[in-house]
Image (cartoon, grey):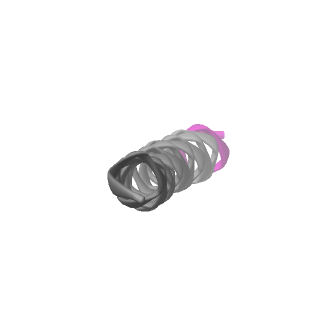
Amino acid sequence: MRVLQNIVFGVIVAAMAGVTVHQGLYAIIKTAEQEQMTMTARLSDNR
């Protein structure tokens, strides 16, 4: 019974960690996209 609790706890922690990592990557990608758009806008302004 104790082992089952540990497994469930491990799965929950892993799921939470996975969500955190996913959110972090998503935020990084979004920021990179925004920076790229700003760079493109600046380049078109210079023309």
**Which image quarter holds the C terminus?**
top right
Q: 19 or 3, which is in the foreground?
A: 3
Q: Measured from the top left, where is residue 19 in percent x and y?
A: 48, 59
Q: Relative to 37, is 8 above or below? A: below
Q: Measured from the top left, where is residue 22 in percent x and y?
A: 53, 50
Q: Is the magenta stretch mostly helix, strand or loop?
A: helix
> Is residue 4 found inside the magenta-colored segment of the image?
no
Q: Residue at x 50, y 52 (%)?
A: 11
Q: 40 or 18, which is in the foreground?
A: 18
Residue lying furthest front? 1
Left or right placement of residue 41 versus residue 14 in this view: right
Left or right placement of residue 40 versus residue 21 in this view: right
Q: 3 or 28, which is in the foreground?
A: 3
The region drawn magenta spans 43-47
Q: Measured from the top left, where is residue 34 in percent x and y?
A: 51, 55
Q: Which residue is drawn at 43% across and 44% down?
A: 21
Q: Residue at x 43, y 62 (%)?
A: 12
